[in-house]
């Protein structure tokens, strides 16, 4: 049995403003009532995510809590995602008030819409 590494590493982060803007402008958009994905394909071996939480969502404590939950959901489902994509995940107001299960449900729904989930039908 292969051990899965569930760490959120630096190689999985979009860090620069330029990379956020490039994924936002050139990527395809997947929209949900609670958040938005901007997905840019064919970007190497790793999947990278950038988290965007605007000041309209609340004070710094609320924004940091929202980003922490978003990071945790991504980290937990990293092994299920296809490689070679850049994702910018933008939170909306309703997501900031949600619980962890809702974050997970929204992430998986958007990943499925964006065709980012690995096929598990291997026989």
Image: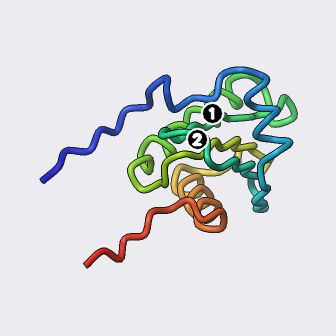
Residue at the (76%, 40%) spot, across then down:
23
Asked where in the image residue 69 lies, by quadrant, the reply is top right
> Residue at position x 57%, y 37% from top?
48
Residue 102, by quadrant, is bottom right
Q: Position of residue 107 (x, y in %)?
A: 59, 55
The image position of residue 92, as x and y in percent, is: 79, 47
Look at 61% across and 32% down and name the residue there.
65
Residue 82 placement (x, y as % from top left): 49, 54
Give the number of marks: 2
**Mark 2 Cα shell of 10 Å, populated few (<14), some (14-19), many (≥20):** many
Residue ID for mark 2: 70
- Residue under numbered circle 1: 67
Taking the image as shown, residue 73 lies to the left or right of residue 86, namely left
Up-down relation of residue 48 to residue 18 (above or below): below
Q: Where does residue 117 sit, x and y in percent of width and height?
A: 50, 62
Q: Are the residues at dot 1 and dot 2 in contact (C-beta closer than 8 Å)?
A: yes
Q: Nearer the viewer, residue 94 or 14?
A: 14
Quadrant of res 123: bottom left
């Amino acid at each position: 049995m292969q051990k899965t590494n569930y760490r959120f590493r630096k190689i999985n982060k979009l860090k620069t403003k330029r990379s956020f803007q490039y994924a936002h402008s050139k990527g395809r958009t997947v929209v949900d009532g609670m958040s938005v994905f901007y997905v840019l394909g064919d970007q190497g071996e790793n999947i990278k995510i950038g988290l965007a939480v605007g000041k309209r969502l609340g004070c710094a404590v609320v924004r940091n809590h929202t980003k922490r939950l978003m990071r945790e959901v991504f980290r937990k489902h990293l092994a299920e995602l296809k490689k070679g994509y850049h994702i910018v995940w933008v939170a909306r107001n309703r997501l900031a008030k949600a619980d962890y299960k809702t974050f997970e449900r929204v992430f998986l729904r958007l990943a499925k819409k964006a065709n980012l989930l690995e096929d598990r039908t291997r026989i």
